[in-house]
Amino acid sequence: MTKLNFPSHPLLLGFDRLERLVERTARAGTDGYPPFNIEVTGPNSFRITLALAGFREEDLSITIEKRQLLVRGQQQENEKDERIFLHRGIAARQFQRAFALAEGVDVDQAQLGDGLLHIDLHRKEPEEAIQTIPIIRG
């Protein structure tokens, strides 16, 4: 007897994208930088908060590509900055953090303040209408 994989089960039509989503999410990395929280802020709303000490608005880019929310950051080196560090514990490296978005989840806004980037999302209620399919004589 042959065991079928989840996406190839004959009763699950069109779920092949789910397998690609899982693979892409696994490849997104477990770097851990920058640290982030995801919280539920309402019945159909969420907030992603990234800790971005030292990043300015112009150092950040937020895009949605193929149902994936991408947050990128790269601090610009200041040529006038002649500081000498005895210890540099605040990370100033570039990053890319990806979050897979389900169908119907949209970004409301992004806000940067006090070293935290807040991205608010909401999920639209799915339409639960019954659809009748006409049968065409052939």
Image (cartoon, rainbow, N blue to C red):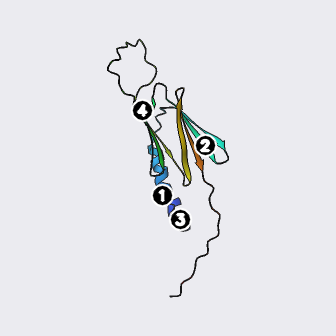
Frontmost residue, 56 versus 86: 56
Q: Residues within 10 Å of mark 1 (few under 14, many from 20)?
A: few
Secondary-structure class at tag 2: strand
The answer for how far apart the CA atoms under marks 3 and 2 are is: 32 Å
Q: Which residue position holds label 2?
A: 46
Q: Which residue position holds label 4?
A: 58
The answer for how far apart the CA atoms under marks 1 and 3 are is: 14 Å
Q: Amino acid at mark 2?
A: Phe
Q: Nearer the viewer, mark 1 or mark 2?
A: 2
Q: Is residue 126 left or right of residue 13?
A: right
Q: Residues within 10 Å of mark 2 (few under 14, many from 20)?
A: some
* The furthest residue to the left: 79
Mark 1 or mark 4: whose residue is earlier in sequence: 1
> On residue 9, which mark appears?
3
Q: Is residue 39 left or right of residue 21?
A: right
Mark 3 or mark 4: whose residue is earlier in sequence: 3
Frontmost residue, 8 versus 77: 77
